[in-house]
Image: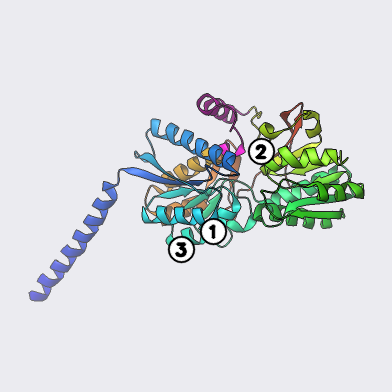
Amino acid sequence: MKKLLALLLAVMMILSFASCGDKKDEEKTQVDLGVIAPLTGSVAQYGTGVYNGVSLAVEEINAAGGILGKQIVIQKFDSKGSETEGVNAINALITNEVDAVIGAVISSVTAAIAPLADEAGMVVVTPTSTADTVTEGYDYVFRTCFADSFQGKLAARYADKLGKTKAAVLYISSDPYSAGLYEAFKAECAALNIELVSVQSTASKDDTDFTTQLTTIQATGVEFLYAPCYYSAIGSYIIPQARNAGYNGIVMGADGYDGVIPYMADPKSMYENVYFTNHYSKDDVNPVVQNFVKSYTDKFGADTLNSFAALGYDAVYMVKQAMEEANTTQDKEAIKAAMADINFSGVTGSFTLDETGTPQKTAALLGFKDGAEIFVESVGLE
């Protein structure tokens, strides 16, 4: 009898603990979403675009009833483009027990937070970190954007399509984004028998004088320059200095060129023959894209309407879809599993994720005409 009573008591205690756990889950009536983005600093235009896109998506989702009936509450942190600030932010969000994190924005910061998030079992979706390694080996880290290896290959294939057999490179050696793009471009050039006749670099993404490197490139006589740098350097320094050095050939880059228009110098004609791969085109006639463009510009204006805004927007909807498919806003293991198997369609395309958590999709090739961005064509590896 005593054994039976002890057994019943043990069962009651287990049920009581389980009930307490269920009650604790039910008591959390909101979805806490962390956001890590550079809202100040040299790449603030990117961070602002991402945060605005996230805010717009959250506003729409909350107005439609939230996720599984729960409203989303944002906890934002300014990384300032700094790895240290990013680490501080992810540690704070882990301590705060948020349900998922959108961020970081640039690859170096995401690379710093990824191992911490993975160890804590925190689902992270970076909208815009394109360096190949930021998601590799991490079960809880995903992205909305394609990877640098994809963009670097596309650039080399575009050079080949144009019949270029020689090319030059100018990249930022200390930056994982720029260096990763260069490595992918170099490898694909080798596969396509395109000779790199000059490879020039700069030490920091904050450098402003590229005259020496561009003069060296101009002396080689090449007509295709791959310069995977950021919008402010491209607009204010690299293109004007390249043209002043006498280089009038093609300059090509990646999504880091998005947002260059406010930084263009006069005459705007010097930016013709400048191209870049990007995650979408705001001129895409797809109603999903045009609805986003209208909603975003109505709320925030057009100055930060870049691919980073669209990717931030899509990242929130990816989290929403994963939580709904997992039927939970708090079970991170289940959310992670749903994210890994996601079949998503949004502003920046329709895609599944590969084994590294990276989308498989096409890119938009964009250029400039009369100081305005133009869509050239859709490009892929097929």
| Local SS, label 2 | loop
Give the mark nearer the N terminus: 3 vs 2.
3
Crowd around label 1: few <14 · some 14–19 · many ≥20 (10 Å):
some
Evaluate whether residue 37 shows in this view: yes
Considering only order in the chain, which callout, 3 or 1, is on the residue closer to the N terminus?
1
Q: Amino acid at mark 2?
A: Asp
Magenta-highlighted stretch: main secondary structure?
helix
Relative placement, left or right, of 347 versus 324 is right
Q: Nearer the viewer, mark 1 or mark 3?
A: 1
Residue 208 location (% of width, % of height): 72, 45
Per the model, the C-alpha gap separating discs 2 and 1 is: 24 Å
The local crowd at label 3, few if under 14, some if 14 to 19, many if 20 or more residues have their Cα within 10 Å, is: few
Specify start and end residues of the magenta stretch as a single range. Answer: 286-310
Name the residue at 16% across, 63% down.
12
Q: Amino acid at mark 1?
A: Ala
How far separated are the C-alphas under marks 1 and 3? 13 Å
Q: In which image quadrant can residue 281 be found?
A: top right
Q: Which mark is residue 112?
A: 1
Q: Position of residue 247 (x, y in %)?
A: 87, 41
Residue 367's image quarter?
top right
Disc 2: which residue: 258
Q: Are marks 1 and 3 in contact (CB under 8 Å)?
A: no
User: Mark 3, mark 2: which one is toward the viewer?
Assistant: 2
